[in-house]
Image: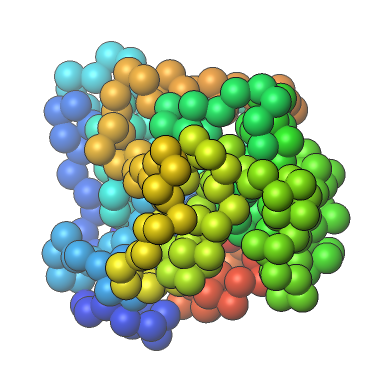
Amino acid sequence: MKAAVYYETGGPEVFRYEDVPDPECQPQGVVLRVEAVSIEGGDVLNRAGGLMAGTPHCVGYQAAGTLVEVGPEVTQRRVGQRVTTVFPFGSHAALRQVGWRQSFVVPDDLDIQEAATIPIPFGTADDCLFEYGHLQAGETVLVQAGSSGVGLAAIQLAKRAGATVITTASSDAKLERLQELGADHGVNYVQQDFVAEVKKLTDGRGVDVLVDGVGGEVTQRGFGVVAYKGRVLMYGTVARDFSRYNLDEMRMNKSITGVSLTPEFGSDRVVGMIEGHIRDVARGELRAIVDRSFPLADAAEAHRYIESRKAFGRVLLIP
């Protein structure tokens, strides 16, 4: 099969579009012919300097397509079903093998490209807001980088839960689109001091929940807008700044939690939660936003585009 792989981590130029062996279907596994790869923030970070499962390494958390093989111990899936999948690596390829519990059946009325973008962004946003953020109706949420995959999901889920939603983005055009998805207030962090603006919007009180996938200085400054008993949920480090934080702003009964779906891939809780979000997108109750797509052979160009921070929603690779 064809795959976008690399032999060492680094910039997008490390990608090679090559023939690699087809994956072997495991007894409890399934193999899908990939129709859409949703590039996740973790994929970009892994390519830049993460762990490699082998040489060459095929990166990628999330992909959707049609099942072409089902393991002998699997009765819950069948050849020909459309599924969207999650796994720590292996999405940037024409074929993918995962455990059947890491696959989610795609309803007939849901576009496969939209389905490819759902599990990790909506699952991560849900965990940030509810499993660990304990969000309640009437509270105020700040979603950093609202036009990211997790950001778009968090805005919709928080608004549906009855929260007041503040979000940040790099342009007024993005903020207008985010308000259409449920954001009550938007802050253009290029032109405005987001700390001052958030304090103004909350009459100096701050926010109850801060959803942050940026890291670095943005996260450090964000501590200053967290209200008494507020919760900070950190799910990523786009800034790639892993320096230590000054936690003085977090002393007043505030908390910080790092959120990752990876340890619970396949758990009953996460499977049920993601299946619910897939149904909601299929019914039009939530929206999965695709920015643009690239051929799998152009994986390097797609990663460059993501790193330009121009995207609004998910960027896809099409084998």
- Nearer the observer, 192 or 122: 192
> Which residue is at 55% across, 70% downward?
306
42 sits to left or right of 172: left
Q: How does the figure colour the protein chain or chains?
A: rainbow
Q: Can you tell which quarter of the image residue 113 is in?
A: top right
Please provide percent x and percent y for residue 136: 60, 23
Count of numbered circles in the view: 0
11 sits to left or right of 282: left
- The answer to whether any part of residue 80 appears in the image is no
185 in relation to 101, above or below: below
- Nearer the observer, 249 or 282: 249
230 sits to left or right of 246: right
19 in relation to 97, above or below: below
- The answer to whether any part of residue 101 appears in the image is yes
- Nearer the observer, 53 or 36: 53
Please provide percent x and percent y for residue 103: 38, 31
202 sits to left or right of 150: right
> Which residue is at 80% across, 43% downward?
184
> Which residue is at 25% across, 67% downward?
50
Q: Residue lying farthest top? A: 75
> Which residue is at 21% across, 77% downward?
7
1 in relation to 233, above or below: below
Please provide percent x and percent y for residue 1: 31, 59
Please provide percent x and percent y for residue 200: 77, 54
